[in-house]
Amino acid sequence: MKHILLATMLLPGAVMVSQAATLSFPEVPAAKEQAAKEGKPCLVVWYGSDWQPKVREFCKNWEAIAKEHSATFVFGQFDDKTGLKVDVRKKVLPIEHYNLPAVVLLAPDGTFMAEYDGAQVSQSPQKVMKKLIKLAEKAPEVAKLAQTAAKAQGAEAANAAGKALELLPAQFAVRCGALTGIIRKQDPEDTTGYKALFAMEHMAMYGEIKGILNGGKDGKLSGKDRKFDDAEAYVRKVLSNDRMQQKKYRHRRQQWLAGLAYVLRERIVSTTTPDKRDTTPIVKVYKELIQLDPDTQIAKGAKRFVHYWSPNTVTIIKNNFYDSGNQTLGFEKDWRVDVSKSIDGPGTYTFSLVPVDNGGMVTRNYRLLVNGKEVAKADAPADKNTKSVKFNVPALPKDAKVEVQLTAQCNDGWFGCSGHIRMQKD
């Protein structure tokens, strides 16, 4: 009986690999051809492959959706079974995907319009469809403008491409390579304003700014000789674009405000000493950025910069000496480290700042405070990089607050420096 039971238990193991998840939709080339012939937008369901979690359920749901909306869309499918490389994928679909599964909306002529991916298309397909149906109404106009842009030259081509992109949600417009490529090629001077709005991704924007700062493509200028005025004027011109004031483009405006802050920061760091730096203009730009949408990643980063660069802020470590603090490149800040719970009676204590990841952290002016009153100060020149100091801690009143304060400056590291405060009783 045991042998029979064992055989029965093992039997399913022989068929553990599930049958391939399938859709009845045509593959992308055939679907695009059909969409062009019928004048309908094409909706490509990109479901990954059998390894995708709950792929059968996903395919079943989208089969049902296709039956319901076949009058509006031509449905196509794409998967990863063949192990296609990214560049081949981009030839099959006009974008690189983010997270699978995904659905990709194409205009009747094949122009990319939108991509919804991941949990959105798996858990809330009906919600996604509401957005896609609304977008589908614009598909004929997008296709018409895209065809005009492809046939025209110069600013006329860029203007047609830009108008097509304005019909799309901003997060998808910047990913439409066919149209942004036309804008970049046909109007490199950006006379239409569409290049700044759509044709440059975040890092490409910084590349453009750095090109101006360093004196164009030759990049021969450096330090104080860089073209700060030209770079600032360029970014401010972009920000003055009427379209950039619209609410739907607030995230693009956030990116360009970050670019402006970058130029201001480079100017200040390159042309002034730490004790003479007025960081107010940078703080003002970042506060405007945050106000546009405080929940974006770029706004969350800006909040940290505001803290670092506001003249009156300090870095406070509350969780005793073993915690870490951060320091922004090129600026100095006061640190306050609460060591109250770590003091073990009166005696001589060594306090040190140990840089993390790099050695660019300069520290000086260590002070010891008890209940806000300075009781000791490190005997070191103001410009000396003091990594460790010894303080004689007196007998303390009950529940006394003991702080070590110091001045720190970061001279290395793209994103800044960080360090650990350590304490040891001699």
Image: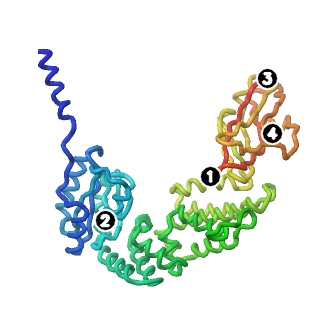
The residue at which mark 4 appears reads as 386
Residue 53's place in the image compared with 272, above or below, is above
In percent of width and height, residue 56 lies at 22, 47
Residue visible at 85% across and 37% down?
378
Q: Amino acid at mark 3?
A: Asp
**For residue 189, which quarter of the picture?**
bottom right
Q: In the drawing, what numbered circle is on residue 105? A: 2
C-alpha separation, residue under disc 2 versus residue under disc 1: 37 Å
Residue visible at 81% across and 39% down?
386
The residue at which mark 3 appears reads as 426
**For residue 219, which quarter of the picture?**
bottom right
Q: Amino acid at mark 2?
A: Leu
* Left/right of residue 1 with respect to residue 132 in the rendered view: left
* Left/right of residue 109 with respect to residue 267 in the rendered view: left
C-alpha separation, residue under disc 4 versus residue under disc 2: 60 Å
**For residue 148, which quarter of the picture?**
bottom left
* Left/right of residue 410 with respect to residue 296 in the rendered view: right
In percent of width and height, residue 57 lies at 23, 47
4 or 1: tag closer to the N-terminus = 1
Q: Nearer the viewer, mark 2 or mark 1?
A: 2
Q: Quadrant of the N terminus?
A: top left
Residue visible at 71% across and 28% down?
342
Circles 4 and 1: CB atoms closer than 8 Å:
no
Q: Secondary structure at mark 2?
A: strand
* Relative depth, front residue between 154 and 199: 154
C-alpha separation, residue under disc 4 versus residue under disc 1: 26 Å
